[in-house]
Amino acid sequence: MASNLRFDQQVIVVAGGGNGLGRQYCLDLARSGARVVVGGRGTSANDVAAELRALGAEAVSCVADVRDGSALIARAVDAFGRIDGLIVNAGVVRDRSFAKMSEDEWQEVLSIHVNGAFACVKAAWPHMLAQGGGRIVLTTSGAGLHGNFGQANYAAAKGAVIGFMQTLAIEGAAKNVLCNAIAPMALTGMTEGVFDEEMKAALDTALVSPFVLALVHSSSRENGAVIEAGGGWASRLRWQRSGGLRLPKTELTAGAVLARWNEVVSFETAVDYPKSTADSLNAALGKRS
């Protein structure tokens, strides 16, 4: 599906490349000429790398936890001398209602998703800055955008990934190091137990992969975006802010606020689309554009 976009000589690292979406990314990258580093905690990373080499691609594996990002990036640099793209796909779920969720279940999910993303990017960042560019795709989720019953840990982690990504996008832009996040919807080992048969038939991993490859290619100029993708469809999400309520200090009481709360939350009047903390500060100062 991505055969018209070539990755010749580009080195792409896929953390969590041994299964599901990660494996699909690796296969499509290999078919498009990329030199691929397959990361994963189990021997499946070795299996996928062998599968890629059987296709005629240059590919190596790195059996390591995503939180050992330095090992993964070192493998890329040792094997190919550089890193052009990084896809952080590794993840885990420990679903349980918040009332029953243990601290270990909370910490494990946050650690793998948030600390794992940090470790991989932290190791890749200096290489990308030094070589004058790079592309990073992190993985978020609808749970991180909207919440989901039984996934307080997962939702918190995936929400954190969005803030992390947007900050990287700001800091890397001047050096041509661009970062985005994908919120994929696809049949994988993590979703098999919750998808019905219609969803399983429609949400193939191959229908997400081209959007990720488009973002991680050196010619992409997208930066700081959250992209939902699934079933061959993709869309960018953005914040929308209501017109809001402003009261003078002499009238500002909790009772007055509650009485007019509908004005705080209504989108029926003027709205805008904030993109930065400066936009929020300006609104508070009455300088809203």
Image: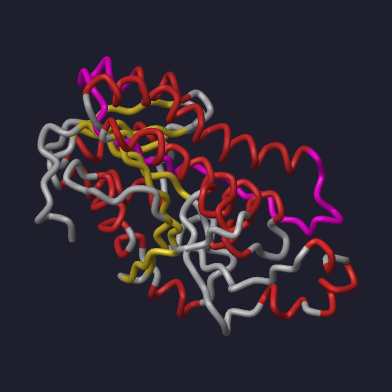
Say left or right for 260 vs 58.
right
Residue at left offset 69%, top offset 71%:
245
Q: Nearer the viewer, residue 54 or 277?
A: 277
Location of residue 97 (image quadrant): bottom right
Say left or right for 31 vs 170.
left
Residue interval drawn in magenta? 75-103
Q: Nearer the viewer, residue 188 or 114?
A: 114
Where 87 sits versus 272, above or below?
Answer: above
Q: Position of residue 139 (x, y in %)?
A: 46, 48
Q: Position of residue 142 (x, y in %)?
A: 54, 62
What main secondary structure does the magenta stretch of the protein show?
Answer: loop
Magenta-drawn stretch contains 147 = no
Location of residue 80 (image quadrant): top left
Q: Position of residue 281 (x, y in %)?
A: 59, 50
Q: Nearer the viewer, residue 180 or 19?
A: 180
Where 129 sits versus 285, above or below?
Answer: above
Residue at left offset 37%, top offset 67%:
235
Quarter placement of the N terminus: bottom left
Magenta-drawn stretch contains 100 = yes
Location of residue 34 (image quadrant): top left
Q: Position of residue 263 (x, y in %)?
A: 69, 78
